Image (cartoon, grey):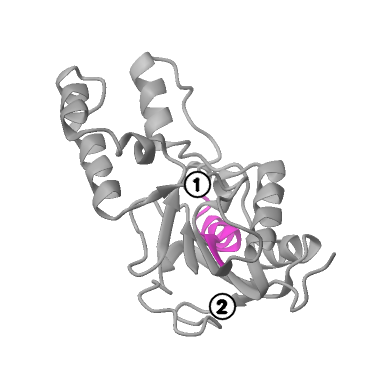
Amino acid sequence: MRVNIGCGQTPTPGWDNFDNSLSVRLARLPSGWISALVKLSIIDQGQADFMAFCRSCNIGYADARALPFRDGQVDVLYSSHMLEHLDRDAAVQFLHEAGRVLRPGGIMRLAVPDLEAMILNYMKDRDGDAFLTQTLLTRTDVRSWKSRLLFLLAGDRGHKHLYDARSLCTFLSEHGFRHPRPMLPGETTIPDPGDLDLREREAESLYVEATTPAVREV
């Protein structure tokens, strides 16, 4: 079993795709109900279109902190630009869950914003505002009811933690993963990755792969 956790609008064909957006759950509503929500201006057409997309791509709901799989059920777990949306405690929960559901010797591939690249851009341009905007570590408070609803539907788009190659590899090692290493765009240790996009958001991404222990620790 190969799973994409936090797929958003980029599910991987041929894989099992999951996201934690409320839109994924609402996508199971009858289409007439969704049309009524649009007419009542509770959601906009773009959100309705995303719900239809989730339904057509069979995207399932999953909380990264409590993955809906049995122990050792997953061969490969991929997650792109999801980890940075978790605070440190939630990220630790995700790694423990990933380690639980992956089979012994299973592979996890993570893509995250590359903090080192952001810092190098800042050192080149010395534009503090652009740097903060790129990090997405700050956001406007959600105040209106429509903004709150959109927040629930689309999820928190802000970042809560950023990583460079060294810190991410260390984080993985600290929580039970073996041989974490950065990967070049297009490079992977995954046998037969199929249609997995190995260059997803290449210009801004750091890719790291790691494995679970070959023998499950008791």
Q: Which residue is mark 2?
A: 183
The vertical placement of 106 against 59, above or below, is below
Q: Is residue 149 magenta?
A: no
| Image spot of residue 20 (x, y percent) | 47, 42
| Segment tinted magenta in the rendering | 109-127
SS label for mark 2: strand
**Who's the residue at 61% across and 46% down the image?**
66
Q: Say whether disc 2 or disc 1 marks the residue closer to the N-terminus.
A: 1
Neighbour class for label 1 at 10 Å: few (<14), some, many (≥20)?
some
In space, the residues marked 2 and 1 are separated at their CA atoms by: 26 Å
The vertical placement of 208 against 140, above or below, is below
Q: On residue 62, which mark appears?
A: 1
Residue type at mark 1: give it: Ala
Q: Is residue 124 magenta?
A: yes
Q: Could you say which is closer to the camera, residue 39 or residue 33?
A: 33
Residue farthest along the right direction in this orientation: 218
Q: Could you say which is closer to the camera, residue 132 or residue 192?
A: 192
| Image spot of residue 190 (x, y percent) | 53, 80
- Quarter holding the C terminus? bottom right
